Image: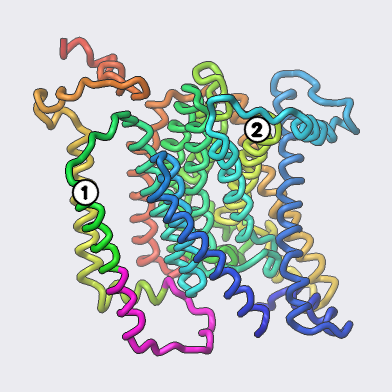
Amino acid sequence: MNLAEGVQIVSFGILAAMMIGTALGVVLLPNIVHSAFLLAGVFVSISGLYILLNADFVAAAQILVYVGAVNVLILFAIMLVNKQENFAKLPGRLIRKVSTAVVCFGLFALLGTMVLVTPWSLDTTSPAVINTVVSLGEHFFSDYLLPFELASVLLLMAMVGAIILARRDLIPESVARQETVTTSLTLPERPRELATLSGNEQQD
Amino acid sequence: MNSGIDLQGSFIQTLKDFGLSTGLAKAIWVPLPMLLMIIGATVGVLVVVWLERKISAAAQQRIGPEYAGPLGVLQPVADGIKLVFKEDVIPAKADPWLFTMGPVLVVVPVFLSYLIVPFGQNLLVTDLNVGIFIWISLSSIAPIGLLMAGYASNNKYSLLGGLRAAAQSISYEIPLALSVLAIVMMSNSLSTIDIVEQQSGFGILGWNIWRQPVGFIIFWIAALAECERLPFDLPEAEEELVAGYQTEYSGMKFALFYLGSYVNLVLSALVFAILYLGGWEFFIPLDRLADWIGVAETTPWLQVVTASLGIIMTLIKAYFLVFIAILLRWTVPRVRIDQLLDLGWKFLLPVSLANLLITAALKLSFPVAFGG
């Protein structure tokens, strides 16, 4: 075993332990903010696994998109809408828990059999450093063109939706002014008049 | 094109000549450039702190630090030692774990980004295929640390400052990435080495600053906003938010934030120098000059001179940009938060998109000048 292989095995062990640990933390911790921060740990360790698989671009994109955007968005949502409510007793908790356990175990068994049944054709020789960006681009514009375009249309739709939601003047007043509940930790939204001081006269 | 001095190759060869195995020689080599880079980054911060104090003093017609060492050069060291010996206070109602992790998450990605900063053909920690993209994605981790610090302090100023910081760095990451993308499109590679190579050959005339006149302004504005330098230092605007997310911090944890922001400033200046100012290239093409006076490219003394000139040029360019950033701090008033977000989303984003499209069009029509 040479140096590179040893480093790979050790870092795989560390990354796997980190991923399982943080993922368990996300599910089990009582404080939702702690869970959200640990989610970043899960994403970072997945990105580390991508690096071990020689997928450097995917690893960097994983950090940029999931840690830098998705997780920050989740944190913003949690911190801005910090609603504190007591959990009401649900009827039939035992049945819910048992059915959840069955579904989880079923999924685990399915994935486990998939891992065991699939004839993995493992290549023991590590490939030379390839330009992953170029091969990704070639795949995107040849055999994966349809999923690529569909994903871009989906993102466009999400963007249009976000803009519609952000522009209050496109939503009728009665719908927009529904929520007036403020808890102690909510940051109240800045009134729109402040932003348009100059154009105030025409509206009033 | 010869590859210049190969420190790694010769170091490993020397160790092997002493009778060590190849694996051991490589294992001894691996931590050396990393350590050197961390030390270099920290010393760079000390220099920037001293420069900031001296230049701001000059801008306000004061003298600045002058007792600690000649011209006060030891003042930043004294500052650092003071911060190390201060008591490390964790507020009573704060979340101790998140409070401690916050500064760490801000500092570590910044130091990691030094992986891809080249000071010469072979003078960098590692030449990654995804080079400059690593910098962009690592800098997107910092907002998490800022949110963590703001939330864990259990203080309304900290929370507001943390949210502002995260919002600011997310909004300015997009124009930053788009202006970098225009450069990447011209050099056909994300690797920092290739980006500098593409600018070489014509001296100062070949630098990207002439090909990307809009791009470099967008990049510099966005980089200043990412570093929270003064026209955009809203997250810690003293008059509104005490010190933003740093309000409850003291001692070494505060020093980590401080260090992180200055390392980030130096890093942004270095990346600017690589992307737009030709990295380690001299003002005139040195290899042509050597060719002209009849010295072979592989002459040892020429290689040493070129390599040291490369390091000096990179640092000169970077510190020139730091100088501009410090001068900006003392001449430009702070923007409001709505002005900041308006500038980012309504002006810089469309302009950088247009810049990207124009670059693509120019690349197709003039492949000679725009790296076809």
Q: In this figure, which residue is indicated by the disc labeled 2?
A: B254
Question: Which quarter of the figure has residue B35?
Answer: bottom right
2 or 1: mark nearer the eye:
2
- Residue A114 rendering spot, x and y as whole percentages: 31, 79
Amino acid of disc 2: Phe
- Which residue is painted at 18% across and 43% down in the image? A161
Q: Is residue B297 visible?
A: no
The residue carrying pointer 1 sits among few (fewer than 14), some (14 to 19) or many (20 or more) residues within 10 Å by Cα, namely few
The residue range painted magenta reads: A108-133
A73 or A138, nearer to the observer: A73
Q: Which chain carries label 2?
A: B
Q: Name the residue under label 1.
A: A158
> Which disc, if any, is residue B357?
none
Q: Residue at x 65, y 61 (%)?
A: B118
* Badge 2 vs badge 1, beta-carbon distance below 8 Å: no
Determine the image quadrant of residue B26. Answer: bottom right
Measuring from the top left, give residue B188's x and y in whole percent: 46, 68
Residue A204 on the magenta span: no
Identify residue type, mark 1: Ala
Determine whether, in the image, residue B300 is placed left or right of residue A15: right
Image side of residue B130 versus residue A94, left or right: right
Q: Tag 1, which chain?
A: A
Q: Position of residue A52 (x, y in %)?
A: 51, 72
Would residue B359 be visible to someone looking at this image? yes
Front residue of B36/B352: it is B36
